[in-house]
Image (cartoon, helix red, strand yellow):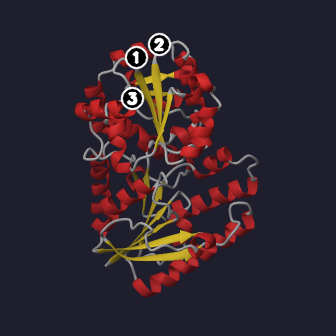
Amino acid sequence: MSTFHIHFTFLENSGEVRRIKNIDTDLAQHLSGEVIEVVFVSIKSLANYKKSWFKLSDSVCKKIYLPLLPFSYKSWVIKRLNSIWCSLLVFILWLFYRPKFAIAEFSIGGQAMRLLPSSVQRIIDVHGATREEYEYSSPNPNKRIADTYDYLERKGMRKASFVVCQSEAMKKYLLEKYDFLTANRIFSYKCGADGKLFYIDNDIRTSIRKELGVKETETLFIYSGGLHKWQRIEDSVNLFVDYAKKHEGKFLILTLDKEAAQALVNQTGEELKNRFIIHSVTNKEVYKYLNAADVAFLLRDDVVLNRVASPTKLAEYMFCGLPIISTNVSTYWIENSSYIYNVDIEKNLDKVNDFIKNADREAIAKYALEYLSVECDRRNLNILINEAKK
């Protein structure tokens, strides 16, 4: 008995990979004895195929790469054709492997499972609000493409045996959007952090601050992650610049895109450039630098796609005891507002030092362990697993 795990991500360092790997470990391998990983990638990426591309987990017995039709992001016609193409290829694979379960990523993941027989239990892992994300991130969104996303999402949701989504807010959103869905078919999986990889360590804090040249009297701000527009790194930099003109402190930007980060910092002027530290590390080392910091930036616009999210960074920050600088949208993520410095309310960082001083790092880490851990996610998925196996 096998499970198809279908996804559209081949870049190991992309944000959703940790979630995809966790879903595989916590769900796919517990549904069946073997997982067949099915990856759709662009023709250009397929031409540069590398054997070093990651595997979801040790339970993957076979990995299959399949090409996507080009230009589907810009053309709604190609997007529709690509949807049919994906489902046709997956059906052909089904003829060879006959899996009992199939998991597909994204709210439109159902398109890849369209032609599978009803005997296959279909699970859709919803990473976010697809239409809203497209409209938010595109300078000139095409209504036909946006409508296509909704069409594919609706068709997939209707046929899904179960839906896994990234927050209780997303679950509520889906139930309101689709009257044919029921609460017992939807399971929350919050992109939690692993307490074995992220935790408080005061000795490491001291060591890393020394390595970075940060004095104990200085407030160290941190941002960890990519530099996409929706992550509002420019706003974080500008807030820190205003703060740095009045207070002692430094800003550590932990990112793989060091060149873009440096270009951003260069715009702050010669006087403030030395207040920034740009660094790159592997995911396994991130916790060390989070421990070194005093507070973390996690700015997001207050829009639907962010309201229904559960940022992995939020969990990682809090597991290391970090209070957060965020916006109004953070009220959808956690109930305890005392752990969040809301810049939509404060407008600046003038009061952030008092906020940091009053933050209880141990309490923050304990809260994360209780509500934002992979263990919490696994408890929810165990219910799904038991239901699927009936």
SS type, badge 2: loop
Question: Percent x, y for residue 299?
Answer: 53, 32
From the viewer's perspective, is residue 122 above or below residue 353?
below
- Among the 4 quarters of the image, the one containing residue 241: top right
Residue 351 bears which disc, if any? 2
Gap in angstroms between the C-alphas marked 2 and 1: 6 Å
Which mark, by number, is residue 213?
A: 3
Viewer-side label of 3, 1: 3
Dot 2, crowdedness within 10 Å: few (<14), some or many (≥20)?
Answer: few
Label disc, if present, on residue 140 of the rendered structure: none
Q: Is mark 1 on a helix, strand or loop?
A: helix
Tell me if label 2 and label 1 are in contact, CB under 8 Å.
yes
**Amino acid type, callout 2:** Lys
Q: How crowded is mark 1: few (under 14 residues within 10 Å), some or many (20 or more)?
A: some
Q: Residue at (60%, 43%) from the top-left corner?
A: 260
Pick the front one: 43 or 21:
43
Name the residue located 54 percent from the left edge and 47 percent from the top edge: 257
Q: Is residue 343 left or right of residue 339?
A: right
Residue 348 visible (yes or no): no
Q: In which quarter of the image is residue 29?
A: bottom left
The residue wearing badge 1 is: 355
- At a point 40% along the width and 16% down the height, the residue shown is 355
- Looking at the rendered structure, the kind of residue marked 3 is Gly
